[in-house]
Every structure is written in structure tokens, then in C-alpha cells.
Amino acid sequence: MVAFRSLWLLLPRRVRQLPADLAAVVALVIATNIAALAPVIRETPLRVPFGLAFVLFVPGYAFIAALFPEAGESPASSDEPTPPADSQKMVDDSDSDGLYDSITSRSGIDGIERVALSFGLSIAIVPLIGLVLNFTPWGIRLVPIVVSVSGFTLVSAAVAAERRRALPVDERFQVPYREWYAAGREELLEPDTRADAALNVLLVISVVLAAGSVSFAVMVPPDGEQFSAIYLLTEDDDGERVADDYPTEFVQGESKELIVGIDNHEHETTEYTVVVLEQDVEVVENETATSEGDTNTTVNETVVQEQRELDRFSTTIAHNESWHHEYALEPTMTGENQRVVWLLFPGGNVPADPSMDDTEYSVHLWVNVSES
């Protein structure tokens, strides 16, 4: 306890004086960054609930807090009956002006409006941030999105804190945690009738079951389709990676750059091994007769005359992540229409003599290699 208090005192005074709701916003931003970016934690289901709150509620709440630092008119005051016309006439002009000023000075919004606007603005703010990122070198990726939304939220929370400090204490917006706790405790532990007590028990059981169901769905998500992918990319004149303009003309002993890409959608961290083969192939035309025997169909079959292993390399990729590897391709077999094949083996289990029949994930490139 003493150590915690010492750490608390080490924080800047402005941070220690943050209102409870804004402190919760900052804490949730930090927790979401850890859940989404930390090497080990990001692979756990914790990123799902934190990410949903981070995207759908927190940015809008911080922005609304910055726009409306003052407390809104309470429902009790808004529901008070309007005095009769005769009694209103008895109020002198000075009292009327004071009453008018006290009502019009309340320019804030109440808690229900604040929550509703928080959801709506979050749904509007996050896509706008993504649109801006789309025109930057970073693009719409996990790290830029998390950093940008975090920065927007923290700046909004800081502005909200400063604007609240500028108001009198009785006009600042505050989340009534203590009132909620007292009302809930009284309702649950001190019911007026036995029927109320039974309803309270049913309510608690329902909430526990609902929370358990949601937690189970988050912690044990459906596997869905499991697959991997391997592909080739090149860089254009602008430095962008594209699936086009592959090098096809080589001189023996010359190498050219390619980018080998791997995507992991196996729902778990997977070790991959890539085997690079060069093949001297021949296309053979075979004629196959139909069942009636009066027509023939020509089928082209690719036959491997000679095969060599050029290279192999391994990597480990987390679920739903991609890996790009710059690869210098240098064929050793000369001739036209030589085939270079990249075979992808999830799990790292590679046969002694690998071929395209041993894996469902492969990509190939046709090249011409001259001696000089």
C-alpha cells in the first residue's frame, strides 16, 4: 500500500487531479495499446473487448467531454412542475431575471445524452482518422490506427480536463459513482417486498449468465476458415509494392530482387518453411478420347525434367499477420521457360524431396536464363 502511494505521488500533479471518468479514459487507452501491440498479450482474446470499447466509445466520450465540460440539467430539475400563472405574476422582475439566468446558464448535457453522443461520435471519428491515414505513408494498418486514435483521445481528454478546471466546482460535470453505488446497494440489499427481493436475485443471475456468455464468446471465438498464403511482389518506381512487373530475363550468375509474402490465417502462431526450387520442365500434349470414342481432347501436361533446390528459409508469424521477405533470385539452370517455385510448408514439416504435390501453398515464376 505504501509502495503504491509512493508511485502515485511520483505522477505529475495534473495527472493525479484528473477527474475519475477522464482517468478511466486514459487507463483504457493504455490498456488497449498493451492488448493490441504487446508481443505476447496481443495474441490473447483481451484485444477484442478492449478494442471494441476503444473504437466504439472512448474517442467520442473524450471529445464530448472536451465540448461539454459543464454538468447538464438534472432530470429531477427538468421534471419539476411549472408554477401556475398567478404565482408567476407574483414574482418580481429581479427574481425572474435570476431564475432565467440560472436556467440558461446550464448549457451542458446530461449523462444519457453524453453516452449516446459518445457512441455516435466514435463511429464518425474513427473512420475519419482512417481516411486521413490512407493518404499518408503509414496507411491503414494496426499500429498507425492505434497510435492515431490514442493520440486523438488523449488530447481530447487533456482539453476536457483543462476546461473543467476553469469552471466552478459545482458546475463541473461529474459521474455520480457514489450515488449509483448507494442506490444499487439499497435496491439489492434492502428491497421493500419479497417480490422485489426475488426480482433482484433473478436480475443478478441474468447479468452473471449474460456476462459469462459474452466472456465465453470472446475467449473462445469460432475458428472459422484456416489457411495460409504465399505470393510474390515487386517494387514500382514509386517504391510501392505491387503484384506486377516480375523479372523474367536472367543471365546466369545474375540475381534480381523479389519480395516473398506470407499471410497467416491459421488462428494460431505458426512456423513456416519456404523451399525454393528451380525446374527444367517440358509441356507435353496428350490426346484423350471421350466416352463416345469419336472426339479427342488435347490436355497439356507439365513434366519436370530436372529439379534443383535453390534455397530455403523459415519464419514464425502470428495469426492474422503478414511477413514480407526481400529475396534475391539467382537461377542456375539455363534455358527458356525455366520454372522457379516457392513452396510453403506450415508447421515446418518439409519432406526429404519436396515438390508441388507435397503442399497446397505454392507460387511460381517462369523465367528465361541465358549463359551470357
Image (cartoon, rainbow, N blue to C red):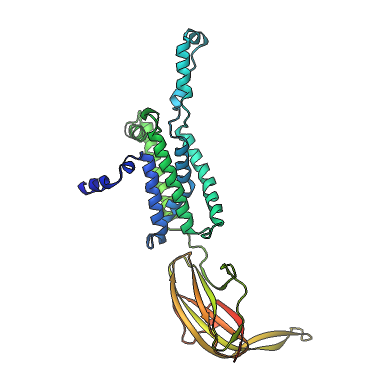
In this view of the protein, which residue sits in the foreground, 272 or 223? 272
Q: Looking at the image, which residue sits at the far front? A: 237
Q: Pick whichever, 164 or 125, lies toward us.
A: 164
Q: In the rendered image, is residue 98 in sight?
A: yes
Which of the two residues, 154 or 317, is positioned nearer the viewer here? 154
Residue 360 appears in the picture as rendered: no
Q: Quadrant of the C terminus?
A: bottom right
Reply above or below: 119 against 261.
above
Residue 8 in the image, given as x and y percentages of width and height: 27, 46
Q: Is residue 178 above or below residue 38?
A: above
Instruction: State the image coordinates of residue 338 (x, y, percent, origin top left).
Output: 61, 86
Quarter-wise, where is residue 336 in the image?
bottom right
Q: Nearer the viewer, residue 368 or 286?
A: 368
| Residue visible at 55% across and 49% down in the picture | 128
Q: Position of residue 165 (x, y in %)?
A: 37, 34
Q: Residue furthest left?
A: 2
Query: What is the x, y in percent for residue 168?
Result: 37, 29
From the viewer's perspective, is residue 271 above or below residue 12? Answer: below
Answer with left or right where residue 36 lies relative to residue 289: left
Q: Residue at x 22, y 49 (%)?
A: 3
Q: How many marks?
A: 0
